[in-house]
Amino acid sequence: MGTLQAITGMNDVLPGDARAEGAPVERWRALEERFRAHCEAYGFREVRTPLCEYTELFHRGVGETTDIVEKEMYTFEDRGGRHLSLRPEGTASAVRAALEHSVLARNPVARWYYLGPMYRAEKPAKGRYREFYQVGVELYGDGSAAADAEVIDLAAGFLRALGITEFRVRLNSLGGAASRQRYREALVAHFAPVEAELSPESRARLARNPLRILDSKDPRDLPFKASAPRVLDHLTDEDKAHFDRVRAFLDALAVPYEVDHAMVRGLDYYTRTVFELQDASGSLGAQDSLGGGGRYDNLFRELGSAADVPAVGFGLGVERLLMASPAPAPSRPYRAAVVAASKDDVAVQSAALALAKELRSAGVETHVDTRFGSLKSQMGRANEQLGAAAVLILGGNEIASGVVTLRDMTREKDDPDKQRTVARAEAVAAVLAHRRTTLGGPTP
Ligand code: HAM
């Protein structure tokens, strides 16, 4: 029987010492903690929603004519015949949760953030996976241009906090319902005469959702896309004023951006402001979109809300952020090991386990090689595999005299202070003191 492998396009994240490729779990955790702290500084709070939802949520939320819904969802029937899908993104689920729990009835403005896996059956490539992680924020109940600018500033500031300096913020406006209707008519007038020359996909989209044609990468569509009318020329005065205010606020917040009138985003729920953060270092190759988002003032109503709720947010791809950000210098954590100088004396081994437990309670990462091999092999593991700074040795003699042998692994072999005996009752304090001197400075 062959060994089993992970599903194509779905990745394991391993601790640094076990890792062959990809970022180690330590870097993932550091990114997640930084994201949490960054969002909370802007007043956002974490939400967690299920990985799986009724398929209808994404049909109504993300849009029937999007690539995601047309060909990328992991959809299946559960045992009760219900149609479920693994979430391809987080925005629709978060709106569902806000409505389900009447969140805005208690407080008319909610600022939420989330992190977790998303699922899209795309063709795997560098930076494009079938299970990938996003960090994202959603801001509900505030239709102001200042809210858009704050959300974009939060995203750009997070990239900088990760040490990503080479990126572009691309900005566009898709307008509200009235602008969209005007623009739709202009697009149909532009594409209809050349319908026969478009790709079959774009032909199908011409009637259902002509905006999606602008998202096509099919070479047959490109020349007609390039000459298509520009959405910014079809905005109502109100939508235009909103866009101008977003730009003014971004200037005030010193967030550099470029207006890209051809950017439409791949999801149907956007209204007014849309933006993408694009890697500009070249290190990501073709998948250079670090994240994107925008305003979606109609989604609440489309998902059943009686009232309109303005909303804006973004999602960033964690794998891509990890590829684009510099790896921090490896830090060497302080570790201790307790070694039992007996292969078969359960009393000695018990004393070693108890001492390790005491050290852990005092906050010291402590290892015991519970296979209890020879003293030499236990010492070798503590030194070579763990890089322990202190090793505590317990044998029958030590136990009888109420002491432990403390070996300072940071000292040279011939240093007379390398090894000393300390009273068992003083052992934890001695290790804490050693940690302070080794790390230099107070420890938490
Ligand atoms: P999105 O543009 O579909 O937006 O995805 C956001 C980011 O997720 C992308 O820019 C990319 O970094 C990452 N991403 C997407 N697909 C993959 C993949 N197959 N493999 C690796 N990374 C991927 C959204 O999902 C919206 N929900 C964002 C949003 C929130 N808009 C408003 N609020």
Image: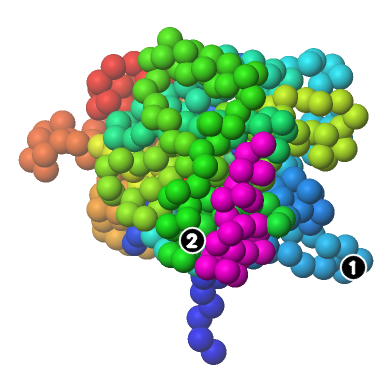
On screen, 440 above or below 119? above
Give the answer, above or below, for where 253 lies relative to 324.
above
The residue located at (87%, 32%) in the rendering is: 305
The dominant secondary structure in magenta is helix
Give the position of the C terminus as an image quadrant. Answer: top left
> Looking at this view, is 154 or 79 the one in front?
154
Q: Are marks 2 and 1 in contact (CB under 8 Å)?
A: no
Does 17 appear in magenta?
no
Q: Residue at x 84, y 17 (%)?
A: 106
Cα gap from disc 2 to disc 1, whole angstroms: 40 Å
Can you tell which mark lies on residue 221? 2
x%, y% of residue 385? 30, 54
Pick the front one: 396 or 133: 133
Residue flagged by tag 2: what amino acid is it? Asp
Which region is colored magenta?
A: 182-206
Q: Which quarter of the rendering shows the N terminus?
A: bottom right
Query: Residue most toward the front?
Result: 193
Q: Residue furthest top?
A: 252
Choose top left, top right, bottom left or bottom right for residue 337: top left
Relative horizontal placement of residue 44, taking residue 221 as reference (left or right) = right
| Residue at disc 2, CB closer than 8 Å to ligand 1 | no
Amino acid carrying mark 1 in the image: Gly
Reading the image, the residue beneath label 1 is: 81
Q: Is residue 266 above or below residue 326?
A: below
